[in-house]
Structures are given as C-alpha cells and as structure tokens.
Amino acid sequence: MPDVLLSGVSKNYGSIEAIDRVDLNVKDKEYFCVLGPTGSGKTTLLRLISGLINPDKGEITFNGKLVNRLKPQERNIAYLPQHYVLFPHMTVIQNVMFGPLSKGLIAEEAVERAHKVLEMVNLDHRSTAYPHELSGGMQQRVALARALALDAKLLLLDEPIGALDARLRQELRYKLKSLAKRLNLTVIHVTHDQKETMIVADRIVVLREGRVEQIGSPYHIYLQPANLFVSNFVGETNFLEGTIENVDSKGSYVKLQDGCKVRVSDTSYLPDERVILAIKQECVKFETNDSNEVNSISGKVKAIRFLGNFLKIEIQSVNKSILNSKIPITYASDLPRLDQTVSVTFRPMDVSVFPSPPRGLNQEIEVT
C-alpha cells in the first residue's frame, strides 16, 4: 500500500471545526494509531481518509495521487467502523463473501478467499453459523474478516475492539498487530485507549479538538510528551507548579509552590520563570526513612488503592501538595500505613518541564 499523506486537511460541521489543518504521513506497512479523547476528531479523520466525507480544505494523497474526490470503493481500502453491522440473515461465510462478490469476484474465488481470512481470525470452524449464534468477540472477528476479504492493503479501524470485555480486548489487540504485519497491511487504527495504543502502534498521533498535539513512537509520546495535555492524557502523571530558582550546566533547581526545592535535568528555562513539572506516577518512589536522594519531599500516606497488577499510593506533602506513586503489586509487603510519614523521591531525569500556561494548569490538561 502506498504512503497516506494528509496536507492541511480541515473539516467543519457548521461552526464546529472537527479537523483543523491536519498534516500526517502514514508510511507503507505502518501500524499507525490515532489517539484522542471523545470529540477530538478521530472518527472524522478516518472518514476523510476512507472517502465517506470530503475535506473542506487540504489534500489527501495515496502514493502521490490525489484522492479527495474519489469514492470509497475507488480507494482500495477496507474500513471497519466502530458500529459494525453483520447481515443477520447470512451465515458467517456469506457475510465475509459479500464484499468480494460485490466487487465482481466469481463465487468459487470468493468462497476460497472467505475461508482463507476466516482461518486467519480462527473462525473457519464457525463458517456456517449465523451472527446471533456467536459471541461478541466472534462477531467482531467476523467483521474484521469481512474487511480483510476485500484484499485491500489499507485497513481503517475505528475503535475495533472497544466494545469487548477487557480480557478479549487484550487478546485481540495482539492478534490485530500480528495479522497486519503478516499480511503487509498499512493500518490506521482509531482509539481512545492509551494502553491499547502503546501496545499495537508503530507511531501515534495525539488529537485534541481536531488538532495534532504530537506525532511519534509510543516511547516518545509516553516519555517525551510535547505538552501538558499529552503528558496528562497518555499515562498517569503528577503535576507540580513552581519557579526556576537557578540553572547550571547539569540542570535546574525549581522552587515548588509548597516551598520545597527540587532538581530537574532541563536547562532550557531562565531563573524566575514559572513552570509545571510533570512526573509519571511509576517514576515516583517513597521510603519510610529519611532519604538521601536529590529530590526528597516529606509527606503522609493518605490513600492506598488496589489496581490489579499495581498499587497506587497517594501521599500529601507537609504543604498539602499531592503526589501519587504507582508501584507493582509485588511490593505490597513493603507498604506503609495510612498517615505514616514517608519520603517521596524521583530522579531529575524523570521530570518533564513545561512553561506555566496562561489559562492555568487545569484548563490546559482538561479532556473535553
């Protein structure tokens, strides 16, 4: 499949700017995820690429060919919408054959292709069943097989596993990625699930209110967020407000609002600049004794929450700032008691520093 290039693409619905001057380049055979909160423009973007709607401005090209006005059936794509619908009066194999037959494939070849893709999704043994006889996960896989049977090299997925239970989602996300790589597909996968994105994506674009906030690998999106919104939306993050006190060749000292002074590796700010520190919760540690670490803040344990594989420890500093520490469940035997005084620590290199936003932290990170 050719590269998919969007240049200055915009789409309005009346006064609502659903997509605002988006530039994207999805590479051949790439598994590309579009991540964002509800209402960020994810589905609109996918519908623009599929040809179901046309952009008001900008260009969409496949391998340098302008496709703005091409109909969906002329783009050689397979589109699996969020609310897929199987034909209830058709068997599984008839559902999967429908696309190839409508494109002019003879019946024998359509049957052969349908069996092939059903084998890929481990459902060939249910080829004669009707949709109502299948579980939700099986129906989802039939819908995926129906898309794959079109033999397109660009696969568009809109929340493809969002309606499934947690265990099945976990299984299918790995299968999707493996299947796409095996078939040399280019995939554009829309989701609001950060964990799902981190697992399957080669690259990610984060959307907010129709605009691109950041594009990059899962590693860079997670550990090197471009701004406060991305830092908050991708992963669980602590935020501390403060002022740069002084800068040297190895980093900066920041005086927090609660009076504590901490060290960060960033040297790009000037003394007296107001900043926001962002620290992922898993990078925050605590000790029950006084710590000799560079960054050590004294506080009391206010809550301990069980999260399955992890525990979240909420700690309130002496000046009322809240820091959360996310630790593996294997550390449960070393847990502090509620109201016990501990030392919270984090490494300077684990802190992202952002300029203090004029409209305030809460509005900057708000998920609308």
Image (spheres, helix red, strand yellow):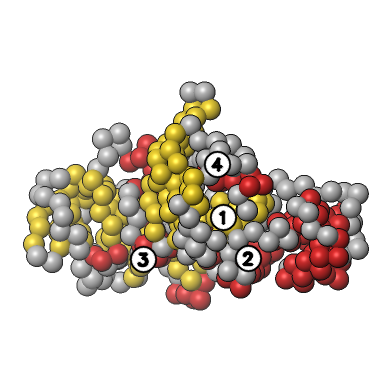
Please provide percent x and percent y for residue 59: 45, 41
Mark 1 is surrounded, within 10 Å at the Cα level, by few (under 14), some (14 to 19) or many (20 or more) other residues, namely many
Q: Nearer the viewer, mark 4 or mark 3?
A: 4
Residue drawn where x is 15% and y is 58% of the image: 267
Q: Quadrant of residue 143?
A: bottom right
Q: Are marks 1 and 2 in contact (CB under 8 Å)?
A: yes
Residue pointed to by mark 1: 189
Q: Gap in Å between the C-alphas at discs 4 and 3?
A: 39 Å
Residue pointed to by mark 4: 48
Amino acid tagged 4: Leu
Can the viewer see residue 297 in this picture? yes
Q: Could you tell me which quadrant the N terminus lies in?
A: bottom right
Q: Which mark is residue 283?
A: 3
Amino acid tagged 1: His
Residue drawn where x is 81% and y is 62% of the image: 110
Residue pointed to by mark 2: 176
